[in-house]
Image: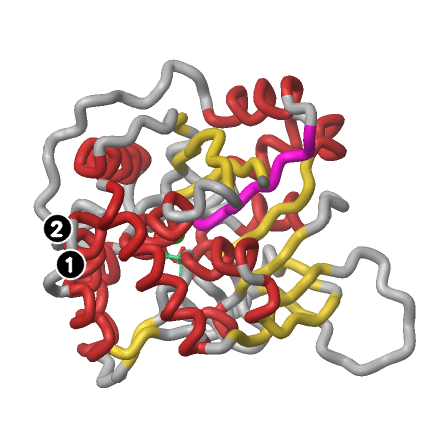
Amino acid sequence: MRNIIIDCDPGHDDIIAILVALAHKDELNILGFTTVAGNQTLDKVTNNLLKVETYLGIDIPVYKGYNSPIVKELDVQPLAHGESGLDGPVLPEAINSAKDMHAIEFMKKTLLEAKDKVTFVCIGPLTNMGLFLKTYPELREKIDQIVIMGGGIYNGNVLIKAEFNIYHDPEAAKIVFDSGVKVVMAGLEVCYSGSILLTETERAKDGGKASKLFYDLMKFYQGYAIRNGWDRTAIFDATPVIYLLYPELFKSEEKEVYIETVGEYCRGMTVVDTRNRATEMKNPKTVLISTDREKFVEVIFDALNKLDAQY
Ligand code: BDR
Ligand code: CA
């Protein structure tokens, strides 16, 4: 059993990642959620998560983190996630509120009390994680690994070379990548390799509660792919969760990765050293390269079926 904290900005794919984690209670023990501004404002993404908890009838503690990046202005993503940050499904008003403790104080308390090391699953901008490591560097040794959806080996999405989560707070990302803690990077390439075909979404159409949520999320989220003429879409944030559950589905390589924090075109880029040289790496990251698309998609549908039987 692995103890995890999910740091997120829900976000359609954030919620799908959370559904996959919830379906694997024997493997992943979610100690809490921390939220961060990204896809939408901090209040909106936190409320989205609390509404989903109410819809599913679950009560995992939620802690709000930072409401803007360290240096940059907040730059939300209505094109991909809508004005609410979770457009599409009709959800009940949230019964619970976020806890009265800042996200990084929750991280601190959890690590101080933990007998075993804790894994962080970071699927939003890295503001919380970066400022946590900056504020409490002595707690690094209590972290097993930080598995991140962010960056790309070759390409970006919001910018030519920058992926949204890293672009949104490059200074925070730099702190995390330079921290010396084990980092696993699920960048754009591995996420695209696990893309779901738009037609596959229909499998969830007549399912139970979790499937219905997934279906309604996807019907909005796929709009972005449809507008671009694609026949599939990546469910980016599910990748780190599925990696933790089924690492055998992934190809990965150890690579040095640097975060570009300056630059006219490349600010927010993850600069991956893809050169093939026999020099010793100082601080390599595990960079996920690709996955088995069909098995990846099957993990998602299996998770939905399990949750449908439960909720
Ligand atoms: C990342 O950006 C967000 O829009 C998604 O939730 C995901 O975390 C993909 O670039
Ligand atoms: Ca996200």
Q: For mark 1, give the secondary structure.
A: loop
Residue that mark 2 sits on: 89
Q: Tell me if residue 132 comes above or below residue 173 in the rendering.
A: above
Disc 1 residue type (three-letter)? Gly
Q: Quadrant of residue 96?
A: top left
Q: Is any atom of residue 166 visible in this view?
A: no
Task: Give, as a single range, the part of the protein colored magenta.
Answer: 116-123
Q: Main secondary structure of the magenta part?
A: strand
Q: In this rendering, would 210 be left or right of 128?
A: left
In the image shown, does 186 or 260 lie closer to the viewer? 186
Q: Which mark is residue 207?
A: 1
Is 133 one of the magenta-colored residues? no
Q: Is any atom of residue 188 visible in this view?
A: yes
Is 120 one of the magenta-colored residues? yes
Q: Quadrant of residue 160?
A: bottom left
| Ligand 1 image-quadrant field | bottom left
Q: In this rendering, would 24 be left or right of 1?
A: left
Q: Tell me if residue 286 comes above or below residue 20 in the rendering.
A: below
Q: For mark 2, give the secondary structure.
A: loop
Q: Which mark is residue 218?
A: none
Q: In this rendering, would 248 be left or right of 294?
A: right
Residue 204 coordinates in the image, percent (x, y) = 19, 64
Q: CA distance from mark 1 to mark 2?
A: 15 Å
In the image shown, does 255 or 251 lie closer to the viewer? 251
Give the quadrant of the C terminus: top left
Binning the other alpha carbons within 10 Å of mark 1 as few (below 14), some (14 to 19) or many (20 upward) gives some
Residue 197 coordinates in the image, percent (x, y) = 28, 79
In the image shown, does 23 or 36 lie closer to the viewer? 23
The label nearer to you, 1 versus 2, is 1
Q: Which residue appears at 54% of the width and 69% of the height? A: 152
